[in-house]
Image (cartoon, helix red, strand yellow):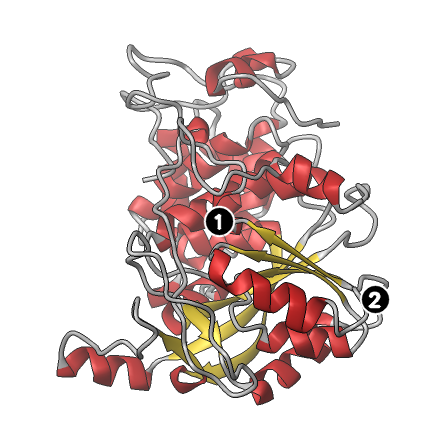
Amino acid sequence: MWAPMAGLSPRLTLAAFPGAARLCLWRPGAASWKGVPARNRRGLSDFRPKLAPSEGFKVLPPGVSKSRLESKRYILSPDLAETMVPFLLRNDGCDLILEINPGPGILTSALLQRGARVIALESDKTFIPHLEVSLGKKLGGKLHVLHCDFFKLDPRSFGVIKPVVNSKLLFQKFGIETLPWSKGIPLKVVGIFPTKNEKKMIWKVLHDIYSCTSIYRYGRVELNFFFNELESQRMMANPLNPNLYYALSVLWQVAYDVKLLHTEPWSSFDMCSQSGQREKPESKESLEQQTQQNLCLIQLTPHKDLFSQHLTSVNYDVFFHMTKQCFLKRHGKLIDHITSLSPIDAMDILKKIRQDKTIKIIDMYPSDFKCLFETIECSKDHSCKWLYDDFMEDVIV
């Protein structure tokens, strides 16, 4: 079976897997990662929330620090908060919620009133007194507040990132116990996914779950995030939506059960400037785009059967590489891609996965890509199972 391999570089991690020679036929430079290894590099920007007047939050905290220049969305509608609560508290044995940047605490209050235990990770200190005093003390002491940016937990980049918190200390502090992957959900995360550097953060989440690192050391943590509508459609796309179907669609759906829970108009959220005023769009076009756009609440529940003997937390990056390479020519035939990816006989692979030689990449479902990868990995007749180009592509970019 599999087990997380901590503390090893990508090349050493791959080499540590039994039968490592099966991985590839290396050319000169094949093991290079453009400088720093991808899994050790993150480079995420600093996201700072801004203050917005809202119903149920009568007294706003002091002004935001001048160093906090970027705007952030908040849930400002009590009706939206009430709509979200049943999605999060489903009588499934998990009432522990990790809320990301609650801001004025509209959703926090609704969750606490329904009996949830909430850990609020707030990246702006100015909101913390309100959350601790107005909500934490008045609603049964089931709220814990921590100055922390969830999207900077366990960074892959070098250097100090503030506020500094890692998932191990966080889980130990609040007594969150590890659950085996085949068991239930240890906690649920809810928040709004930032739009700036969105793609890098998406790759970070995918790397974390496939490598069983960060919050996924503790089990199948469920994510409930608001994404923009286009990204949500791409996450759920398949061959029936060919224009929206990409490598990320496959990677999301292989790792998670992806569900659209709710679609909410832009007006239920706000992006505020440093002074606490509603931010004006840069142009008339951007205003029209915002008013026509919805945010979608997507639930991401890790699959119990994500890992197998042949897809593991050690070799997942090869699966990433294979999937991305396939979608570089999305309308190409699978048999041609197999020939460029592996020295194993392509017709033999197609026979084992029960696919016709005419099938195209765009016609394959996410589960088909996983089956393809595992079939190549389990081949016993070849010591070298993968071919690479001049360098192994950096999956973060």
Q: Nearer the viewer, residue 113 or 246?
A: 113
> Mark 1 near mark 2, Cβ–Cβ under 8 Å?
no
Residue 91 percent coordinates (x, y): 84, 71
* Secondary-structure class at tag 1: helix
Tell me what residue is drawn at x 40 percent, y 71 percent: 51
| 242 left or right of 136 in image | left
The quarter of the image holding the C terminus is: top left
- Residue 90, numbered circle: none
Tell me what residue is drawn at x 22 percent, y 82 percent: 287
- Corner quadrant of residue 259: bottom right
Q: Is residue 270 above or below residue 225?
A: below
Q: Is residue 288 above or below residue 240?
A: below
Amino acid found under the numbered disc labelled 1 = Phe
Q: Residues within 10 Å of mark 2 (few under 14, many from 20)?
A: few
- Corner quadrant of residue 275: bottom left
The quarter of the image holding the N terminus is: top right
Tell me what residue is drawn at x 78 percent, y 78 percent: 114
- Corner quadrant of residue 41: top left
* Secondary-structure class at tag 2: loop
Q: CA distance from mark 1 to mark 2?
A: 26 Å
Residue 234 percent coordinates (x, y): 42, 64
| 144 left or right of 10 in image | right
Q: Which residue is mark 1?
A: 151
Q: Is residue 241 visible?
A: yes
Q: Which residue is mark 2?
A: 92
Residue 217 percent coordinates (x, y): 69, 37
